[in-house]
Image (cartoon, rainbow, N blue to C red):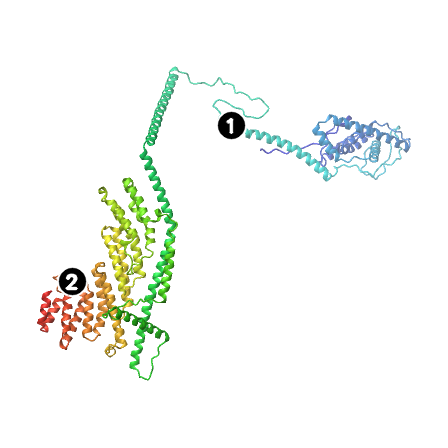
Amino acid sequence: MAHRPKRTFRQRRADSSDSDSTQEPFAEPGAPREHADLGPAEEGLPSGGGRAEAAELPRRAWGRSRGRVWASSRHAARAAPRLDRGSDVPESRAVDLSTDEEDGTHRSSETKDDQSSSSNSSSSLEEEFTSLVNIPDAAFIQAAYRKRELARAQEDYISLDVKHAFTISGMRKNTEYPESEPDDHENIIPFTPKLQTLRQKMAEETAARNEETIEDSEEDKKYQDIWEQQQMRKAVKITKGRDIDLSHSSESQTVKKFDASISFPPVNLEIIKKQLNTRLTLLQDTHRSHLREYEKYIQDVKSSKSTIQNLENSSNQVLNFKFYKSMKVYVDNLIDCLNKKIINIQEIESAMHALLVKQAMIFMKRRQDELKHESAYLQQLSRKAEMSTNRSLAIDEKTQWILEEIESRRARRRQARVLSGNCTHQEGTSSDDELSSDMIDFQKSQGDILQDHKKIFEDVHDDFCNIQNILLKFQQWREKFPDSYYEAFISLCIPKLLNPLIRFQLIDWNPLKFDSIGLKQMPWFTSIEEFIDSSMEDSKKEDSSDKKILSTVISKTIIPRLTDFVEFIWDPLSTSQTTNLITQSRMILEEHSTCENEVISKGKQDLLKPIVSRMKKAIDDDVFIPLYPESAVENRMSPHSKFQERQFWSGLKLFRNILLWNELLPEDTLQELGLGKLLNRYLIVALLNAIPGPDVVKKCNQIAACLPEKWFQNSAMRTSFPQLENFIQFLLQSARKLSTSEIRDEVKEIILILVKIKALNQAESFIEEYHLDHLKSVIKEV
């Protein structure tokens, strides 16, 4: 809104009928105009009555500022008859009273006239302003009257010194006041505007603010109307050449007249005809497009009705839809069931695995602790023999208890072998896994786990937990809709669906136990085989992927389970565990050989790699063959000799268990483990430290018997493996020692060992060197 200049207000002129109404209006209180008006009046006044008029100006000006009361009193003063100088004071007082009454009459009548002539708004403002003015009383008015008459009586000027005694002269004869009457000099005539009170200032500011507010509201309304017009013009699209008046004023809307001065282009009939033809062409094109869309919609409706009719009439489609829908619902429910049960299966599986690992660690730790304590005890015996016999051998209680426990278990095993008639058993070749208190706790914990295992699928229908029923559902799909079955790659989904159920059946399966059930006797194995065989009956699907289901299940489910047993539970020193593990592994690898691919090859490597790693660890941790002086081992019944014999046969047992993997592991791997790490490092060293004789030849025969015959099937082979070179040299050395002694029958045994391991060149040289012609026939038979 534009800035409005400040307005000034004037004091409203008092209504009067005398000659004073022609003078300039009185300014606001406090303005300097009052002093300017006083000077000229004072200079231009004549003597006598002129001074009275001059004296009357200040009072008249002050009267206007006080209200209309002074204006009415002025009329009363002029209308009063002049008094003679000789009249006394009481008479003048009576005249003053009458004058006051007359003055009050004029004042009341004048006030009524003003109220009737003013407007409503100015009347209310005047009443508010009048309420703030103090109306003087009768005594004050009478004193002012006397002052005015006294001022008229002065001839030359009005004295400003009110305390000076004025000289009364030149008064009219008809005046009522005596010449010697004193003036009321205590009342000072105000020549400056009187200071306003707080209430008067507030009244003036309120009046000015009300007037400004009225003007501001009018200007705001004007700008508001302009703004509304602008907004309406923005919202309404104004047609060219047309002016729309949107004002909200009381004036009537004006219509824009046509301007004849505007020139339009000439109208040509050809142009109009051309435009009409163009418009007609567009309409015809639109009509044709609508007709084409209509015909298309008609055809779509007919086609939809025909499809609906065919579907309603065809019962096969309905049956197919029902089958697919039921199959989808079944698969969804099966997946939901397995997702909920897999958590329980994992918990039971982990608990059983932890229990088996704990048992294996107990046996392994016990064997290592017994070996350590027994070896320490024998070392103490050796030191005792070197020292004086007066000193006794001190053994701690724990070592003593362990030695007694070891001997008691060996005695029980010997008694059991005697009862069974096995007299050829060698000390150190037993597994040493007899039952104990720990084994009883193990069986109890295993029974609790199996009880929880049975409760997993108690609340599940057979269609969702029986592998045979599940495969039957997919078999029906394959028979009814083979195309959709193979397009959906069901052969890749079945192993994943069966994985939780197969793991559930394998919780109680221990491939290291002798009485463990084989894979081919398990229910899931037979069910999958039947499912695969039924797909093979269809000659068109001979190359189907269903025959890979079993190998995939073995790779994804069985091999990881078997690998856990190999890494954490299998003891390579146990012949029974090794034999059972080889049987299960051979069966698994045979199933792999039926279908070779990258996944199966990787699964085979995942199984064989931990087997090799576990055997290396057993060679490093469990093989210990001590070397004692010849004097300590001469006596076959000495503790040193017995301990050394047990440890040798224990190492030979591990050598045999390693070479049992000859059909599963590569030859170079077995030769490195069995011949390079175990035979050459431990067994040959122990044989070299032994006394030559029948026992040494017996041990060499056992070593040769452990070697796989497959390695020596080549008839053209005349020299054995490089890893057997140390063993061959030891055999030749033993044969030389035995040939010079009385024991010569063992020489033939050594020659037979050399022939068995294909060391034919070394055997012929030895026979020729020692002229053993009767042994040449042994070489010729080979």
Q: Is residue 454 above or below residue 143?
A: below
What is the crowding at mark 1: few (fewer than 14 residues within 10 Å), some, or many (at least 20)?
A: some
The image quarter containing residue 696 is bottom left
Residue type marked 2: Phe
Residue at disc 2, secondary structure: helix
Asked whether the beta carbons under mark 2 and mark 1 sit within 8 Å of each other, the answer is no
Q: CA distance from mark 2 to mark 1?
A: 112 Å
- Residue matched to label 2: 712
In this view, the residue in front, 253 or 664, is: 664
Q: Nearer the viewer, residue 574 or 28?
A: 574
The circle drawn on residue 248 is: none
Quadrant of the rendering where the N terminus is positioned: top right
Q: How many marks?
A: 2
- Residue 590's x, y, as percent? 23, 54
Residue positioned 10% across, 67% down in the render: 779
Circle 1 — which element?
helix
Image x and y of residue 370, in percent: 32, 71
Is 362 rendered above or below residue 595?
below
Q: Amino acid at mark 1?
A: Arg
Q: Give the labeled residue for mark 1.
A: 233
Disc on the earlier residue, 2 or 1: 1
Compared with 780, 345 (above or below) is above
Nearer the viewer's eye, disc 2 or disc 1? 2
Rendered residue at 35%/47% (across/down): 464
Q: Is residue 348 left or right of residue 172?
A: left
Left or right, 213 with respect to 416, comes to: right
